[in-house]
Image (cartoon, helix red, strand yellow):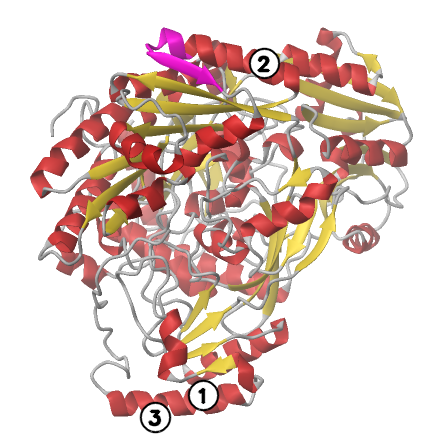
Amino acid sequence: MEGALAALRTAVMEAHRARRPLLLCGAGTKDFYGESRAGAPLDLPGYRGVVDYEPSELVLTARCGTPLSEIEALLTAERQFLAFEPPPLGGDPTIGGAISAGLSGPRRAHAGAARDFVLGAVLLGVDGEVLRFGGRVMKNVAGFDVSRLLCGSLGILGPILEVSLKVLPLPREEQTLRFELGEAEALAAFNRWAGQPLPVSATAWWAGAAYLRLSGAAPALRAARTRLGGETLEPAAAAAWWRDLRSQRHELFGAVRNLWRLSVPCGSAPLALEGARLSEWGGALRWCATELPAAEVRRIATAAGGTAMHWRGGTAGSRFHPLTPAVLAIHRRLKQRFDPHGIFNQGRLVAEL
Amino acid sequence: MHATAPDASPEPRPGDPATGDPAGSAARRREVARALAALLPADCLLSREEELRPYECDGLAAYRQQPLLVALPRTEAQVCAVVRACHQLGVPLVARGAGTGLSGGAMPHAAGVLLSLARFDRILDIDPLARTARVQPGVRNLAVSEAAAPFGLYYAPDPSSQLACTIGGNVAENSGGVHCLKYGLTVHNVLAVRGCTVEGEIIELGGAALDAPGLDLLAIILGSEGLLLIVTEVLLKLVPRPERAQVVMASFDDVGKAGEGVAAIIAAGIIPAGLEMMDRQATAAVEPFVKAGYDLSAAAILLAESDGTADEVAEEVAALESVLRAAGATAISVSRSEAERLRFWSGRKNAFPAAGRLSPDYYCMDGTIPRKALGAVLRAIEAMEQKYGLKCLNVFHAGDGNLHPLILFDANREGEWQRAEAFGIEILELCVRLGGTITGEHGVGVEKLNPMCVQFSPAERAAFFAVKAAFDPPGLLNPGKAIPTLARCAEYGREHIRRGAVPHPELPRF
């Protein structure tokens, strides 16, 4: 791998010297994601492999190009997993791509987001330096937490070369309960349940039904089932439901023209959006296939105390919710300091950076 | 539970009006006081020597410094006004909560204003349905859980100083506690912060919604030791109080075996709510005072807590017992009542005060290592006790790999503080060599500036300064803390160690 690393360093140093923009490329499963894609491709999948994994340390370290499927197979063999359930969207992403995008799956509201599991990251700087932040231990407050800053940065501060992640034991058992409920009743119930000592690991509402996944020891699941009632899904059907939701193979993500992803406080009432709707994360994540104008969707999200992202469709306007001027100013200065000539993923996270 | 050590002045900062120029300092104090007096009521500004003295150090009393002035604003508007005035005059600002920090992060700047947020002590809102608490930064950690208790909720991070330490301080240090393997650190339990930038402008990072657009600036604020933002409000995540909790206490005749017991628990797929270890010196120190019932013949004891529903806890406790027995535990007892559970914990929670009773002074270290290196580190510390001629008690957040060696010394004996400091540095450098870190939860502050030179390369430290400059271009927020300058590292003269670079770290080589 030393050759692959040397090649990446050279490519970055040359691009920096020539002020030539680079487009950081993993497996290409999230090419649709971000404001824009520009620059000469810098391919990262060649820098791959699990560097360190000891199940009893609960830490896995892998190079950026390692396929997510390879990591998950290794973890499954030890009955462990990535609890933030990174969504594989139409293929087999690299771990570097998964962390750069910072997206999390159905377990996010209960287990935490991708960034919550990042313990350390190695960044390739514009001068070709290899910069190590965080580490391979659970607790570390030495220096600013740059590794978590890189999670979800979409490569604008540079390529993540390597990442160390906290992993967790697989739940002993899982079960999914289904309830016939309207949207408002389901959202209220999700939040009520989350405030009780119940082993909830995911929630979703779609087409008049609420889905509740329980994960944990058999006695805890038994007790929860008795208390909550509902219809228990067949294990295979339940696994397929959550897998499809995580990887966006659920029918909502199929043939819609415009899909919006709204992030709102979990207690928010149903939003006044026309179109098919699906909720996750106890109501904190709302998907909506709506043809309403972007400004109207954003207004509704903002009024609820959240933000809206144009996930798919409609090329005009920006995908991400606008930043406030003071926050944008900090972004600008960070970008300027880490990447003064703007060679990394120009405009991908924030149009003007 | 403050570590104490004799006065040791911090290095003088070039350009400080206060160093070696009392007249200039007095004039500057008058100038800044005049500017702030126009912005704050009279009872919000302290400037007399005897008023300033209580603020000269935090929990790390070895480092002391009087500030130019102390400001105690009551409102966010007053904070912004003070910050704007300081920005205009080029005056450094150091934010302070309860002053319980152990690394000198809240030690004042000689030419700066100490901004105490002690009066920001209101819990603004508890939302039981959304499970959040909106609080001011001066609210005590434990007060949040007390206010949330009627709803069956609590705030999970529980640093041992939780009775006194504030949420603002927890945000600055990214504080942990004894339950963070399962429930996370401060960074995992804060949804949003609101704060004042160095320009005096209010910004909000994160939010009640789980995703925010742009870079995750909230993540970098957590643990930033007051170098990036003056926090004025925090939105905390609350979690349901478990139905039941029980502690398993296991004795081992060898510290290495106790370490293997920890690995065996994790390997069995169990994440205990708390997993702590104490060595014989530590149990011997606390037992006479707290009568926790510790096995004094054991080389080390492990405390593993299980929480959840009653049935779940019963099953997990049985699993813990069998795993620990298989790992070679010589004795095991399980708490039979809530009173007994608290008694088992009381010894661990009183380890610091017990050290204070045993010895005139103690120095608490805070390194983290990969758990597998535990036995090797404890053997190395034993050898260092001989080398430095000082005793050391070891308490350990075993689940997180976070060590708290407590080095006992007497500041009144010639050279002991210097020996204790050198002892501590050697432990931290060993942690880095084994792939760990120089601070797991207490922060760098002023105390660990030198070890930072060992853990990070010049380019990595430059990246930290880049972050600092992006938030605080003039460099006025808590300057001189957390990140050492190139010049300081050059003077310190120790090489940056490539982390985990030692081949076969499991082999004893000390």
Q: Are marks 1 and 3 on the same chain?
A: yes
Question: What residue is rendered at 70% in x and 25% in y?
Answer: A198
Q: Position of residue A75 (x, y in %)?
A: 47, 16
Q: Is residue B330 magenta?
A: yes
Element at label 2: helix
Instruction: Report the residue marked by disc 3.
Output: B27
Work out whether mark 1 precedes mark 3 in sequence or the reverse, and give the earlier one: 3
Write down the chain letter for disc 2: B
Element at label 3: helix
Q: Are marks 3 and 2 in contact (CB under 8 Å)?
A: no
Along the line of sight, which residue is nearer the eye, B166 or B475? B166
Give amino acid for label 2: Ala
Write down the chain letter for disc 3: B
Give amino acid for label 1: Ala
> Which quadrant of the structure image shows residue A179?
top right
Question: What residue is rendered at 36% in x and 76% in y?
Answer: B67
Q: Position of residue A284 (x, y in %)?
A: 73, 40
> Which quadrant of the structure image shows residue A28?
top right
The reply to whether residue B193 is in sight is yes
Mark 3 neighbour class, 10 Å CA radius: few under 14, some 14 to 19, many 20 or more: few
Query: Gap between marks 1 and 3, in whole Å?
Result: 10 Å
Along the line of sight, which residue is nearer the eye, B399 or B279? B279
Q: Up-down: is B124 above or below B364?
A: below
Instruction: Report the residue marked by disc 1.
Output: B33
The label shown at residue B314 is 2
Q: Is residue A323 magenta?
A: no
- Bounds of the magenta span? B324-334
